[in-house]
């Protein structure tokens, strides 16, 4: 493990149970719970205030666009809350510092009318803290977009089930049987492909999934099933 990537590689993976779906500016995203990142930072550096922590450098309320009612009458302006923090941590006797901003709508127009969020300062602080920790690699898989891939999420769920299982050997055995069942199903689907295009598409997907799981033997078996079905289709066309 590269010393430069030491922190990153220990904290980059996220427990799917610590995530939730959210909508930001009309886009569906995966959000990580702030408390989970605090827990992971504590595991890495030690208790807050001893091994790591933060200091608020700046806090302000910024006026935004106008808010008007359905009649076009001016009701006021949107207001956003912004905080800038210095997140510090101790590692091997050295002190590291990361600066980041956190932003949250404070006064804005919602479907219920003009709304003021009194929790905005707390949310901005959590936002800044999460962004600062992300720069160190915490929950990097989310910020890299890997949680948009359902197969990746399924892998993480399997890994977490092993980590949390009381009988880890039994859980490992169960997951091994699931993978063998998956291989059988995949081989059967390749064997039932009716066109060369369908065969190629299925094979590419299955090999990608097997490679991601580190199942090289599965990839070899899938390649054999692909070649067998391809030969059968070509023979059928020739006839």
Image: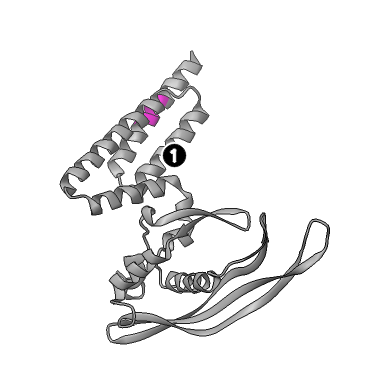
Q: Is residue 34 above or below residue 60?
A: above
Q: Secondary structure at mark 1?
A: helix
The residue under the point 18% across, 49% down is: 168
Main secondary structure of the magenta stretch: helix
Q: Please give the range of residues in magenta.
A: 225-229
144 vs 53, nearest the viewer: 53
- On the image, the x and y values in percent for residue 69 come to 78, 59
- On the image, the x and y values in percent for residue 31 come to 48, 58
Which residue is label 1 attached to? 205
The residue under the point 38% across, 80% down is: 53
The residue under the point 24% across, 36% down is: 177
166 vs 1, nearest the viewer: 166
Q: Is residue 86 above or below residue 143?
A: below
Residue 226 part of the magenta segment: yes
- Quarter containing the N terminus: bottom left
Residue 144 part of the magenta segment: no
- On the image, the x and y values in percent for residue 74 come to 80, 67
The residue sitting at the top extreme is 239
The residue under the point 16% across, 46% down is: 169
């Amino acid at each position: 493990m590269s010393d430069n990537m030491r922190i990153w590689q220990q904290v980059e993976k996220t427990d799917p149970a610590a995530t939730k779906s959210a909508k930001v500016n009309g886009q569906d995203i995966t959000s990580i719970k702030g408390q989970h990142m605090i827990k992971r930072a504590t595991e890495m550096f030690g208790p807050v205030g001893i091994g790591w922590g933060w200091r608020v450098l700046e806090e302000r309320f910024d006026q935004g666009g106008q808010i008007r009612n359905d009649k076009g009458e001016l009701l006021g302006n949107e207001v956003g809350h912004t905080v800038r923090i210095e997140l510090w941590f101790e590692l091997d006797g050295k002190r590291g510092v990361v600066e980041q901003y956190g932003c949250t709508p404070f006064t804005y127009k919602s479907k219920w009318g003009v709304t003021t969020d009194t929790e905005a300062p707390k949310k901005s602080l959590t936002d800044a803290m999460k962004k600062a920790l992300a720069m160190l690699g915490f929950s990097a898989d989310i910020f890299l977009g890997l949680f948009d891939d359902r197969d990746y999420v399924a892998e993480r769920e399997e890994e977490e089930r092993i980590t949390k299982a009381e009988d880890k050997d039994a859980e490992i055995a169960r997951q091994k049987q699931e993978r063998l069942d998956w291989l059988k199903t995949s081989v059967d689907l390749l064997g039932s492909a009716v066109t060369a295009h369908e065969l190629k598409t299925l094979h590419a997907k299955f090999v990608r999934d097997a490679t991601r799981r580190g199942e090289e033997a599965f990839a070899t078996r899938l390649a054999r099933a692909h070649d067998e079905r391809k030969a059968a289709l070509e023979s059928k066309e020739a006839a």
